[in-house]
Amino acid sequence: MNSNICRFIPVNPTNDHIHILNFVLETDSANMEKVKMLSAYRLHYVCSGSGLLHCGGLSWPVKRGDIFFLLPAVPFSFEASEDLTYMYISYMGVRANQIMDILKISSKNCVFSEYEDMEVFWKNGLTYSEEMIGLISESVLLYTMAELGKRTICSTGTEKNPAAAPIVLRVKKYIDDNFSDPELCLEKISHEFSYNKKYISTAFKQHLKTGIVDYLNTVRIQHACALMEQKFTSIQDVSLLCGFTDPMYFSRVFKQKMGLSPKKHMQQYDQE
């Protein structure tokens, strides 16, 4: 393979799925040099060459056989060698959020080395037919994540959950399943689970390192980005489908999360 390849996969609307957006072989390292932000997750596999990833205020050297993640709304840039080539899978969705939590992937923990044995598996993935590309791209993504979990979480035993984790995970799933409900709020959640509002709010933040409102807005904005990638052009329609009753408030939250307005974000897809 000596030229760029990009395979697009239709978005599956089911809330508890991972939505694979594309499966790409990138041979032009200049695409990573400018500081930018993404609207979805990306898992990368470095096929050749080396470089220096700048992300979340930190820098990591990467080389052939490394895998690294880029996260939505986190600025990044990349200084690459001339022979750098890499592959990546873009993805989003509620299930994606859950897996990233399990793997403890963040802007401070996003580069992992010594995965040379996966190169053939990744490259073979792009040779599949149009009918199979969605299945194989999801398989490559999940298998890579499973291997990462096996080598990190399972080997260190950090997967143990504190006592309050079960209710937190139930609340998280409830938000994932009902984010489009415009009346969803802390009070409604506490009533649904028959727990004190303060207890739920404190437990959620302690275990997931983010507040309930912030997490709800994150899920809603991710869904908004998915709708925009499907060419939804009405900010009012997008905001309502994501659970926002006020388009102006939606625009403020969107800019806070993504660093640019919904209108400018939509314009990026018009240029593709």
Image: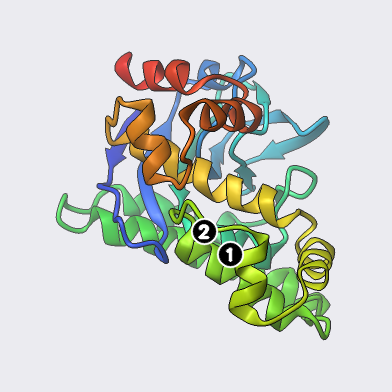
Residue 150 visible in the snapshot: no
* Image position of 100 (left or right of 45): right
Secondary structure of residue under mark 2: helix
User: What quarter of the picture does the N terminus occupy?
Assistant: top left
Residue visible at 39% across and 61% down?
15
- Percent across and percent down for residue 164 are 80, 81
The colour style of the image is rainbow
The front one of 140 and 185 is 185
Q: Amino acid at mark 1?
A: Ile
Task: Report the quarter where the C terminus lies.
Answer: top left
Binning the other alpha carbons within 10 Å of mark 1 as few (below 14), some (14 to 19) or many (20 upward) gives some
| Above or below, comparing residue 161 to residue 226 in the picture | below
- For residue 128, the mark is none
Q: Residue 268, located in which quarter of the rendered image? A: top left
Coordinates of residue 223 in the picture (x, y in percent): 44, 45
Reply above or below: 144 against 45: below
Residue sitting at 38 percent across and 27 percent down?
A: 235
- In the drawing, what numbered circle is on residue 99? 1
Callout 2 amino acid: Ala
The residue carrying mark 2 is: 96
Give coordinates of residue 239: x percent, y percent.
Answer: 42, 37
Residue at the extreme bottom of the image, as rendered = 163
Q: Are marks 2 and 1 in contact (CB under 8 Å)?
A: yes
